[in-house]
Image (cartoon, helix red, strand yellow):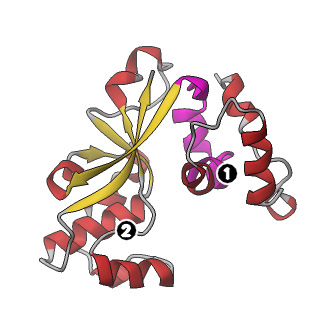
Amino acid sequence: MISKSWKELSPKGIRIEMESFSEYSNRVYATEVYQHIPSTVLEQWIYLHHDNEWMIKNYAWIDYTAVEFEITQWTVNQLKGVKAISDFENSITRIEDEFNSVCALEDDELYWEQHGTWRVPPIIIDTPSFIKKAPSNAELNRPYQLVEGHSRLRNLLISDYQKLFVAESHLIFFMRSL
């Protein structure tokens, strides 16, 4: 089941010939229906991963006209309670790995070294607010599930495990059903 809003949020074109993010966001925001979705959320998640099979299975059924994204701060302990879909659980649970083995953009690595946190907040879904509306094939793990930002969360958990510099709180986009 794919919602009308997921279809409307689809980037135009195919990978190489896909509309630019600027064109995409201008088109999405021009409708005034999706102005509540932060630009960073559009860019890091929906624009880049819209056609990803896991995103379609787990999140394409959601009515994005009835979702809120709150930027908020969470502690490391709160973030330790975040789950991932089963296909990606290893990406946030293998914290014994070396920090440098995690793939990150150079800007992200520099920001992390200076601030002890990520440059771009990951997206975490409040699964209890969606669970009653979810189709049976969607994987929603309680209480919270990481939608986008697996490498970032893994970097944080590895850094905490290795007692490296980690900020006391970390910004996230908290996604809730209205």
Which residue is identified by label 2? 118
Q: Main secondary structure of the magenta part?
A: helix
Which mark identifies residue 47?
1
Question: Any magenta on residue 12?
Answer: no
Disc 2 residue crowd, few under 14, some 14–19, many 20+, Cα 10 Å: many
Q: Position of residue 46 (x, y in %)?
A: 62, 47
The image shows residue 22 at horizontal and vertical percentages of 76, 58
- Give the residue drawn at x 54%, y 23%: 66
The quarter holding residue 112 reads bottom left
Q: Determine the residue located farthest toward the top in the rendered image.
A: 132
Q: Earlier in the sequence, mark 1 or mark 2?
A: 1
Helix, strand or loop under label 1: helix
Three-letter residue code for mark 2 = Trp
For marks 1 and 2, give the CA distance. Answer: 20 Å
Q: Residue 70: percent from the left, percent from the top? A: 41, 40
Q: Which residues are magenta?
A: 45-66
- Judging depth in this view, the residue of 7 and 70 nearest the camera is 70
Q: Residue at (56%, 26%) from the top-left corner?
A: 62
Q: How many marks overall?
A: 2
